[in-house]
Amino acid sequence: MNQILIPPPPPPADDAAGVEVVTFGCRLNAYESEAIRARAAEDGLQDAVVFNTCAVTGEAVRQARQAIRKARRLRPGARLIVTGCAAQIDPAAFAAMPEVDLVLGNAEKAAPGAYLASEARVKVNDIFSVKETAGHLIDGLKDRARAYVEVQNGCDHRCTFCIIPYGRGNSRSAGAGEVVEQIRRLAAQGYKEVVITGVDITSWGQDLPGRPTLGQLVARILKLVPELPRLRLSSIDAAEIDADLMRVIAEDERLQPHLHLSLQAGDDMILKRMKRRHSRADGLRLIENVRRVRPDTAFGADLIAGFPTETEAMFDNTLALVDEAGLSYLHVFPFSPRPGTPAAKMPQVVRATVKARAERLRQAGDEALRRHLQARVGRTVHGLVERDGLARAEDFTEVAFEGLAQPGQIVALSITGHDGRKALARLI
């Protein structure tokens, strides 16, 4: 799975009358939490906390269990409901927790009636039996400047480190017409930027008649929703960027010049043992090809440090990739074995070495970001205001600015400097 992790959530609010949805993991989970919130309201759920869990690492599961126990102490009379990938993969573990009242699978969490009272304490079906995307398209994420649209769910690939297909099932796509209509509604509501998201969005369309491509979907959105100023892609797999998508990148500036790639490693042997479908050279070639047609594109990447069997030389290849590829944003993951995955059975790297390598990668990422920011000093960018004094430029650069602008607006900004983490600018 292509993961962009969001920070662990705060503890549930002590609101005895309301429903709190606590989100762990990726942006897709954040999107789906809005569907959970809407469904819970329709079902009349009251005085409850719903935990939308993540299973990408053992730490994510631990955090969820810890939050559940804390919620019970803070809200002793509330109904505690657990759903998401961790609940899908190991429902028995959560059902065994005395604090938990109901466990829902990923296919059930937004289904009509899911939150109605019943005698069943566990509602988790076989995720691989699900053939369609859930019918829960929603109009944006609560309190966010941009909107996210889930166009795809599940994954057909079996990377050796990843447990997510067992939580999400096989890849399945939302119909193009349905996606376009939702984005048209979002634009009508005033959203200036929409992000296409999913578990493996570059596989979109492979299960639909005619096997359309992600590039064809993007082109259709941009053509049929001309009133939308900005369209952005979430994390994508470098092995599956199609010719149609490359053409749109080159020809339509409304598709934002920022790609976050699921590279995972920069050593061919490690990539092979991960069961990735691209080589080191493939990743570099893709970046070169995109820059050729869209020179202003900034690249981010997921990288795993300390994968089983990784030698110092193999790690050096990954470290060197940061500079060779000209990456600007890194999401670094110290390898964490997940029970049930092939990588968990491989010879493990000593934990202290894993942590040290992850820290070296983060330092390389910090330096790459500083270079990226320095190169933007003196430029004028157009930023989507996320909150007071903070915006995102077209290439996803975070920009702190002086002056007043409403969240959701697109404003012109003159970049005057940076603080190593974000650009500093003034409104024009």
Image: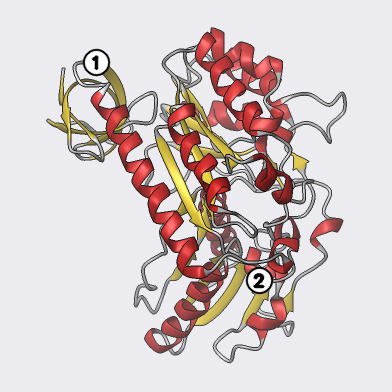
Colouring style: secondary structure
Point out residue 308 in the picture as x, y percentages from the top left corner: 64, 60
CA neighbours of label 1 inside 10 A, class few (<14), some (14 to 19), many (20+)? some
Point out residue 121 in the picture as x, y percentages from the top left corner: 70, 83
Labelled pair 1, 2 in contact (Cβ < 8 Å): no
Residue closer to the observer: 366 or 175: 366
Q: Is residue 175 left or right of residue 140?
A: right
Dot 1: element: strand
Front label number (1 vs 2):
1
Residue closer to the observer: 406 or 64: 64
The picture quadrant where one finds residue 286 is: top right
Residue closer to the observer: 187 or 351: 351
Q: Is residue 20 left or right of residue 312?
A: left
The amino acid sitting under disc 2 is: Ala
Dot 2: element: helix
| Sequence order check, earlier mark of 1 and 2 | 2
The picture quadrant where one finds residue 198 is: top right
Residue closer to the observer: 26 or 33: 26
Q: Which mark is residue 352?
A: none
CA neighbours of label 2 inside 10 A, class few (<14), some (14 to 19), many (20+)? many
The amino acid sitting under disc 1 is: Thr
Measuring 49% from the left and 31% from the top, which residue is drawn there? 194
Residue 252 visible from this viewpoint = no
Point out residue 404 in the picture as x, y percentages from the top left corner: 14, 32
Q: Relative to 205, is 268 above or below?
A: below
Residue 85 visible from this viewpoint = yes
| Residue at the spot of label 2 | 87
Q: Is residue 379 left or right of residue 286?
A: left
The picture quadrant where one finds residue 115 is: bottom right
Q: Which mark is residue 380?
A: 1
Measuring 70% from the left and 15% from the top, which residue is drawn there? 243
Q: Relative to 338, is 358 above or below?
A: above
